[in-house]
Amino acid sequence: MTDVAVAGYATSGFAGETDKSGNELVLETNMAALENAGVTHEDLDTVMFTGQDPYDGAAISDGQKIATSAAYRKPIMRIQSGGGVAIHQARAKIRSGKADVVTVVAADFVTADPTTLSWSSHEALYHRPFGMNNRQSYGFFTQNYLDGSDVTREDLAATAAKNYEAAAENPTAHRREGYSTEAVLDSDPVVGPLTELMLGPMSYGAAVLVLVDEDVAAELDEVRGWVGGTGQATGKYKYRDMDDRLHQPTLRDAASTAYDEAGIAPDDVDAAEMATYAPSFELLGYEALDFCADGEGPSLVHDGTTAIDGPLPVNASGGPLATSPPNSGGVYRAIAACQQLEGELGRQNADRVLLWDNDMHLGEPARTDAVLIFEEASA
Amino acid sequence: MTRKAGAIGVGYSDPETFTDYRLSTMSKEEQAHEAITAALEHANADPDDIDVALFCTVDGFEGTFRVERTLEVMGMGDDIPVISINTGGTAGGSGVKVAYEYLAAGDYDTALVYGSPSFDSVVEAQPVMNTNADPLFERNFVTAIQMGALPSSGYMEISGATEEDFAKVAAQNYQNAAKNPYAHRNEAKTVEEVLDSPMVCWPLRRAMTCPVSSGAAAMVMAEEDTAYEHRDNPVWVEDIDSISNTFETGPRTMDWFPKLKTLADRIYERQDIDDPLDAFDVCETFNPYIPFELIEYEAMGFCEKGEGKHLIRDGVTARDGKLPVNCSGGTLATNSGICASLSRHTEVVLQLMGEAGERQVAGNPELGLAQSWGANLGQFQQMCVFSAD
């Protein structure tokens, strides 16, 4: 089975609005990514599109991006479960012999209210009538976390501030103001214990990743990294079993598969990018990924372990609290992981970066978790 | 070295669910449970045997954003990945493709592909479908029926095919549908009845266009070693591929399906197929507007361009002909959204297993072809070559 490399990537950068059309964003970012990878659109075998119809404001929205994503006369596939899952499947395209060069293309460009859209992803008879949406689910989850542990709102705010500190150094990030713990606590209350700065903004922009098989990689001058291991799992849509949800079994399952496939232990990870839509997910994510024992999550923030200058930086990009484009977040986080392998993001040169992506922008129940290990060297 | 992979079981929701979407009495969860349970039983498999589930749909038609998240039956096993696939009308075929790639690559051993009864949620699907067209120049003028009528009238001009030819193809599908318990329109309409139906949009009469149906389909697939643990006669995926056309329809000629021809040529070259009419024993095509079936014969190389009418006049594609096409009655008889594109594949699998009931073709079919069509004016084309064990 061939190894799969990240040959190149590009992003447009992210902000709270865009004056470009979706096709302008995709064309510019796609061309930049192909150039960055050292391949042409003629080398490209297939395109993996990660947009979701409601965010794009159109049915079968992948069709609109055929020309600008260089998919004309080529196969295009569209996975709606997030960038991490799309990369996971794109790798399978290469390893099954169906393609040698695959792009994973994502863009956010239609002005949308992600909270209202997430409401339309909830169960129609019992949950929509009382307004359940993504932020409600994060608040419910986080309040239960606080109730069952010694974790405080100050711990949550410190975790958020750590992300904002990193984002301030990242020119691609959306929120770059470097908010402090106090600023996070003082921002507007939203739901349960969560304030506005404990939640992500709606970000607009595009991201493209170019994956190649090992033969193509050998012909290129350099590649950005290798996909060393992957895993994914989906939880059931249920609201009542909070103990199970706080344990995050699907993340543990996906991580275990990815660690096994990469032949590594959690200690071997140098940095991580996580799709943490509230600070509680980051603290519990440390535990589910075995970065620390259960219950020890907040200590990694307080002792600086996961700070941008710590021994295990988490979200050197600033994470979803700083940059949260629902279609392109996962692809962007994969790019941020590769940038850390190259010393272009954060303050270290990592040999191995873990990406935890998920589709929790729609809410926590029924989440799909994907864990991918990006490595500097081919296995 | 990639692994061999194929289908080990297929299933549908209850025959009564294949009806007018407005008359559907089953919820999405119930239809999914029925189809998936039937596919698992057919595959001699348990829910825990499934490693990954591919949910195929178009979100706008579902009325729920990412509806698979609230369908517990999709993840019946132990927190398996449930992945949402949306490529419009080809989404069912895309699900088979993703499953095949996962199995061949070694990521998973067993996969479930589910085709949703997409159309039974929204009050009016047409405005949703229109969002798929160019917003400035095309959205206000093109609806589903024009998507069918434009290529059909263009095709009449280049081919000399007549209304009677179209009616013959339609009647052939209806005769087949009458033998298929999972067909929505299962009255064996005649050529005369088709021609007597009201004109909807030239040259399409009502009986030449598909209904809007409910009903669900599922397929269980596995890699080679696992497949033989479940059945003695898996149906293998020999090749599966797709192709994209422009989003704007201005550059298109509206007289044929040239991208489908390109796709077919690529597949036949890889599979060393010189004469597809001779090579294939059974075929299911995407024929929601009946002239498409003739266009597809030609684009997929069953005959020369413009000659499709002779295949129907001579009975070549009838159930007892040289290459039986759409023995299920096709999408013309049953258009349950994305289920309809997966059904092209499930029907070929049943034929190659020799388990298609009354609609089974004679002999022992060994090589089958499934095709689907989707997105803005057939922007996407997809084909899959299956072989019997």
Image (tube, coloured by chain):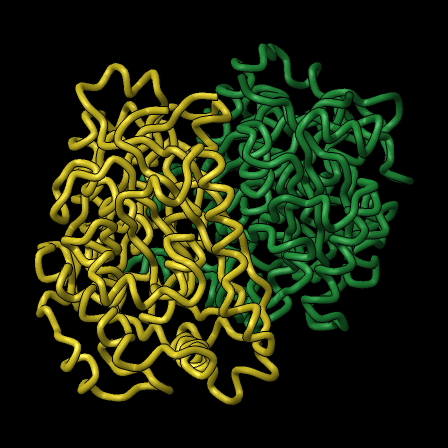
Chain colours: A yellow, B green
Which quadrant of the view contains residue A338? top left
In the rendered view, tell whether residue A265 sits above or below residue A145: above
| Residue nearest the observer in this picture, A74 or A191 | A191
| Residue nearest the observer in this picture, A307 or B285 | A307
> In this rendering, would A213 be left or right of A14?
right
User: In percent of the image, x 61 and y 20: which residue is there?
Assistant: B303
> In this rendering, would A341 be left or right of A329?
left
In the rendered view, tell whether residue B100 sits above or below residue A181: above
| Residue nearest the observer in this picture, A252 or A27 | A252
Measured as percent of width and height from the top left, residue A171 is found at: 9, 55
In the picture, which quadrant includes the C terminus of chain A? top left
In the rendered view, tell whether residue A30 sits above or below residue B241: below
Measured as percent of width and height from the top left, residue A360 is found at: 42, 64
Task: Residue at the far right: name it.
Answer: B358
> In this rendering, would B280 be left or right of A84?
right
> In this rendering, would B120 be left or right of A65?
right
User: In percent of the image, x 30 and y 65: which residue is there?
Assistant: A299
User: In percent of the image, x 53 and y 65: which residue is there?
Assistant: A366
Which quadrant of the view contains residue A199? bottom left
Measured as percent of width and height from the top left, residue A146 is found at: 41, 80
User: In percent of the image, x 65 and y 61: which residue is there?
Assistant: B212
